[in-house]
Image (cartoon, grey):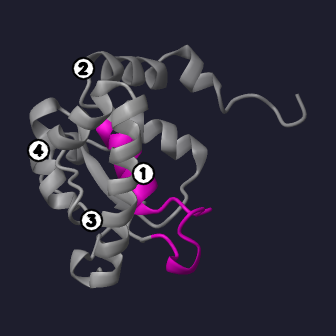
Amino acid sequence: MYSNSAVQQLPDHLKELIVDQHYENYTPQDHALWRYVMRQNVRYLSKVAHHSYLEGLKSTGIGVDRIPNVVEMNAIMEKIGWGVVAVDGFIPPSAFMEFQAYKVPGHCSRYSPDRSNWIYSSSHDIISRSSRACSRIADPEYAEYLRLFQEGEIGSESFSVEKGL
């Protein structure tokens, strides 16, 4: 298990979804794809996104040069009271919301996007989850909003609606 207090306090049913990132299995091509996509993101988003996005990348340990290591990110995110874990692709929506309520919004897939179709990935790959979810929680106001939303009435009721309504 990751050495991070936010991750360690997760209930057992969420811990069962956590997998080892196997960072050593990323290929040079995986890291090159990360660099390319992140450079494009940073170049574009530095012009149109809120400044907290780029600041969040830096303050959560998400760099442009290589795929982030979940263990390293947890050491950094511990300082702001949040955590990150790796999971296998999609997780149930209720688990997704519950992870965030426990201050672990960065449930990153350990997979890189499919290199044959990297422009659109239907999976929760590491680029989409870590660079979007984790970067935003570095902003204290957004982090508190996210936590309150997940723990509050809106988040808890979002999955209690019956099908067909």
Q: Are marks 3 and 4 in contact (CB under 8 Å)?
A: no
Q: CA distance from mark 1 to mark 4?
A: 17 Å
Q: CA distance from mark 2 to mark 1?
A: 19 Å
Q: Nearer the viewer, residue 1 or 36?
A: 36
Q: Position of residue 140 (x, y in %)?
A: 24, 20
In this rendering, which labeled residue sits more in front, label 2 or label 3? 3
Q: Are marks 2 and 3 in contact (CB under 8 Å)?
A: no
In this rendering, which labeled residue sits more in front, label 3 or label 4? 3
Q: Are marks 2 and 4 in contact (CB under 8 Å)?
A: no
Q: Which residue is mark 2?
A: 140
Q: Is residue 150 magenta?
A: no
Q: Is residue 144 left or right of residue 162?
A: left
Residue 116 seen in the figure:
yes
Q: CA distance from mark 2 to mark 4?
A: 15 Å
**Badge 3, how many Cα within 10 Å: few under 14, some, many 20+?**
many
Residue at figure coordinates x 46%, y 62% from the top left: 125
Q: Which residue is mark 3?
A: 67
Q: Quadrant of residue 100?
A: top left
Q: CA distance from mark 3 to mark 1?
A: 12 Å
